[in-house]
Image (cartoon, rainbow, N blue to C red):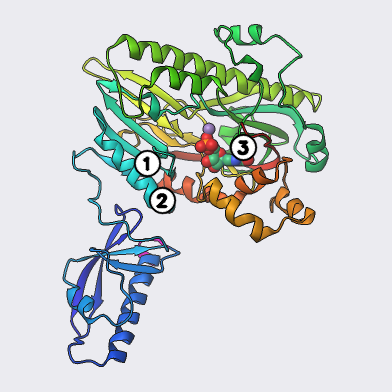
Amino acid sequence: MPSLRLTLAKNSNQQQRTVVLVSIPDLTNASCSIVTKEMTQFRQRIIQFAKTKLRLTRACRVFLADGTEVWGHDLDLWRRLENDGVILVSAGEDYIGTQKPQTNTNDIPVTILAHHVEIDPLATSQLKALCNLDGVVRVVGMPDLHPGNRFPIGAVVVSEGCAYPALVGSDVGCGMSLFTTSLGCNLSPEKTAQKIRDIEGPWLDGCTIDWLAEANVSPTAFDDQLGTVGAGNHFAEIQVVEHVEDEGMLRDLGIDVGKALLLVHSGSRALGPSILAKHASAPTVPLNYPSSELTAYLSDHNMAMRWASRNRDLIAQRLLSRLNTNPERKLLDMCHNWMEMVSTDTQTQFIHRKGAAPSDRGLCVIPGSRGSFSYLFLPNPTAQPHTANSLAHGAGRTTTRKKALASLPSKYGKTPQAMEGLRRTHLGSVVVCDEKDLLYEEAPECYKEVDSVVKDLVEANVGRVIATLRPVVTYKVRKM
Ligand SMILES: Nc1nc2c(ncn2[C@@H]2O[C@H](COP(=O)(O)O)[C@@H](O)[C@H]2O)c(=O)[nH]1
Ligand SMILES: [Mn+2]
């Protein structure tokens, strides 16, 4: 029986390819049932290859490079199988067309750091489309890459000669801060949850002007939101150390495994959108470098980053005061929506991070969802051009909020018991959240598996795991 050498690629991320040899019988005079049988076996062999060689565990559909689905008893399709042909395998999604690996028409390098994680084809095409923007010299998708409204999330875009406020988005300065606390690690999730309700109102126990002045931020029109977590993807979470990978490093960091930690994820609330609206005339119109417009944007952007950082500090203080304690030490404060200007003797580049953390500023935390572990992650300090010195900021969504709202209520039901089930996670943690829709939109199953995200980062030599953290109580309340 003759064999064909075929290149198998994931339909969703065609940078992942593998060459296989498949035996192909001559079906010229075969009956319809034999053709069907052989085609089915061929399809199954391809799916099996995709599962083992491309690690596409949910492989189920097979396409020729022109989009014809391999199915049924189409003898013409059989004839079109040729040596060195490309076969695309999908995990259920529709055919998205063949793409050139690694490059786009402008020859801009595109890297997607995903081998264990599925990437939504829409996110891939949103990422590749970024190469067509003037001045863009490199585009990187993190394993948590997922589609955004127009631009993808989990993306890094490097440009020269100009910069794009829209690529940072509206929540300028959003990030993760991790604090040590004096709370013991055997906290009761339920009792703790009872105590940390209703901390979303304006902060009345102190002076926002003084609080911001410490970070050299003048008062803004949005300071009544200072100390509030904001929209549903933001959260504050009490966590405990689950597993220690590097004991020495944990000791050096001053982390006591017997004490709880507090992770705060929030941004610049309504301040960020006001800055984007002020400086971006249209999403794809850049601000030139050098220009007074870009300087003005960067000045407001930097201020919003400081505001967002102080916001996280205040959230930590407000939340812990309900538990009669204070944040002890800030272990890290890592922003994932921001623009970094990097100048050398010969050039100036702008690194736009939209849902991506820097890998050259020390310790990071990579959260998964309120139902999974978070990873304390130490990036390699060496420069990493292939990642534009960046790493994943979380697990990233698998399911849009809209889809979650459309599918999860019927899956779980709306009874009080069902809602109670959603409130608890299999890790024993609970969420403080009174909005039913938000419970569906932010259900742990709407996020990718963080373990695979981290595996991809480690394999791409981005850094290493120091410890994993288990959620105890997640505070996630309000929609904007
Ligand atoms: N530990 C938790 N992680 C969570 C929760 N909700 C979301 N997430 C993760 O954080 C990132 C944040 O992404 P962003 O794009 O909204 O900035 C997200 O990708 C998830 O992986 C949670 O309640 N607890
Ligand atoms: Mn964020």
The kind of residue on which mark 1 rests is: Gly
x, y percentage for residue 112?
35, 45
x, y percentage for residue 140?
34, 38
Q: CA distance from mark 2 to mark 1?
A: 9 Å
Q: Quadrant of the N terminus?
A: bottom left
Q: Please tell me which of labels 2 and 3 falls first in the chain.
A: 2
Q: Is residue 231 visible?
A: yes
Q: CA distance from mark 2 to mark 3?
A: 23 Å
- Confirm or deny contact between disc 2 and disc 1 (CB under 8 A): yes
Query: Is 54 in the magenta?
Result: yes
Q: Is the residue 282 above or below the residue 407 in the image?
A: above
- Confirm or deny contact between disc 3 and disc 1 (CB under 8 A): no
The kind of residue on which mark 3 rests is: Gly
- Give whichever of 229, 415 is nearer the camera: 415
The label shown at residue 232 is: 3
Q: Quadrant of the C terminus?
A: top right
Q: Residues within 10 Å of mark 2 (few under 14, many from 20)?
A: many
The label shown at residue 141 is: 1
What SS does tag 1 mark? strand
Q: Please tell me which of labels 3 and 1 falls first in the chain.
A: 1
Tell me where the magenta segment starts and ends, as one range. Answer: 52-56
Q: Residues within 10 Å of mark 3 (few under 14, many from 20)?
A: many
Residue occupying the point 72% across, 40% down: 433
Residue occupying the point 77% across, 32% down: 196
Would you say 295 lies left or right of 237 here?
A: left
The label shown at residue 119 is: 2
Q: Is residue 386 visible?
A: no
Q: Is the residue 19 above or below the residue 191 in the image?
A: below
